[in-house]
Image (tube, rainbow, N blue to C red):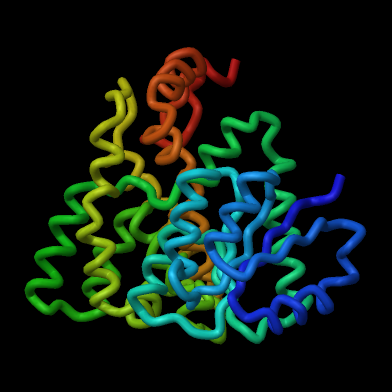
Amino acid sequence: MLKNILFVDDEQALLTALQRLLRPKRNEWNMVFAASGAEALEKMGATPFDVIVSDMRMPNMDGAALLTKVSELYPSIARIVLSGHADSEAGMRAIAITHQFLHKPCDADKLKEAIDRAANLRTFFDDESIAKTVKSIDRLPSLPATYAALTRALAAEASLKEIAKIVERDVAMCAKVLHIANSAFFGANRKVVELTAAVSLVGVTSIKNLVFSVEVFRSFRQTTPIEGFSMDGLQQHALLCGNIARKLVTDRKQADDAFMAGMLHDVGYLVLASRFAKKLGVVMLVCGVTPSAGRLSRGALR
């Protein structure tokens, strides 16, 4: 079955160029082109799309505004920004609701790979409701303690290294900072896995915006309490795994990668706790799962 891909840009010449560039994919993709946000929403109302690829700077409705609408009306659609320019404010707005940010001019193979990856993601989900839930997630809950610590550090004009040490204690904030630092919007010419470098790249102002994003904490506080689940325990376990993983390798670059893998290996628990609290509680009770300890109990292994 063909994947439905929607391209949005107010420059007709660019849409024509994209159509020509991506012609080899015509047997895999049904490509539709729109010259404005309003036209894109009209087409989306008539056709179920798998991926939308939008420019940022457009009249009347810019890319960030369009993708915000798309995330609300069609949360299961993968959202990609393809833009040659974006101011800092618009870029931060887009990052919050974009799955990937690509710069113009974009290598054809890189663009095809990004769209294929986004379109094929749906095949990993048998349940459409799960796909919509996963694709609609734009942030994970963070501990209030981390919020307070970062607030104090920023107020005291702490060094980037000090800020990074606070961020690395929080798996959700750590994931978000690294996600933003590695987005094409910040133009990094290499993968950023070291938190001090990520904090430096993103900037204190952007970190402050993340810290004061009240919704991050509200999203967890509104969930049902789960017996046996501890955010503190999960965070401590993630940090412990990250530090152990880093000590197991000697190469610095590999050590940083190992630390990130250890830190983020249980990040799925945050999604489950914030979106499926009751079901997670039942699974933990029946299977003997102990996420705060990061392992299955003996009862679950029998």
Horizontally, residue 139 falls left or right of residue 225, namely right
Q: Is residue 25 above or below residue 133?
A: below
Residue 40 location, x and y as percent? 60, 59
Instruction: Find residue 294 and report its image quarter.
Output: top left
Q: Residue at x 40, y 40 (%)?
A: 270
Q: Nearer the viewer, residue 147 or 301?
A: 147
Q: Nearer the viewer, residue 26 or 144?
A: 26
Q: Residue at x 41, y 60 (%)?
A: 96
Residue 9 location, x and y as percent? 61, 73
Horizontally, residue 272 falls left or right of residue 102, namely left
Instruction: Find residue 239 and report its image quarter.
Output: bottom left
Residue 208 location, x and y as percent? 22, 68
Q: Residue at x 71, y 65 (%)?
A: 33
Horizontally, residue 48 falls left or right of residue 31, namely left
Q: Residue at x 59, y 60 (%)?
A: 39
Q: Is residue 288 above or below residue 145?
A: above
Horizontally, residue 38 falls left or right of residue 23, namely left
Q: Quadrant of the C terminus?
A: top right
Residue 125 location, x and y as percent? 67, 36
Q: Nearer the viewer, residue 234 or 249?
A: 234
Q: Quadrant of the N terminus?
A: top right
Q: How many marks?
A: 0
Q: Can the viewer see residue 252 in this picture?
A: no
Q: Can the viewer see residue 106 in this picture?
A: yes
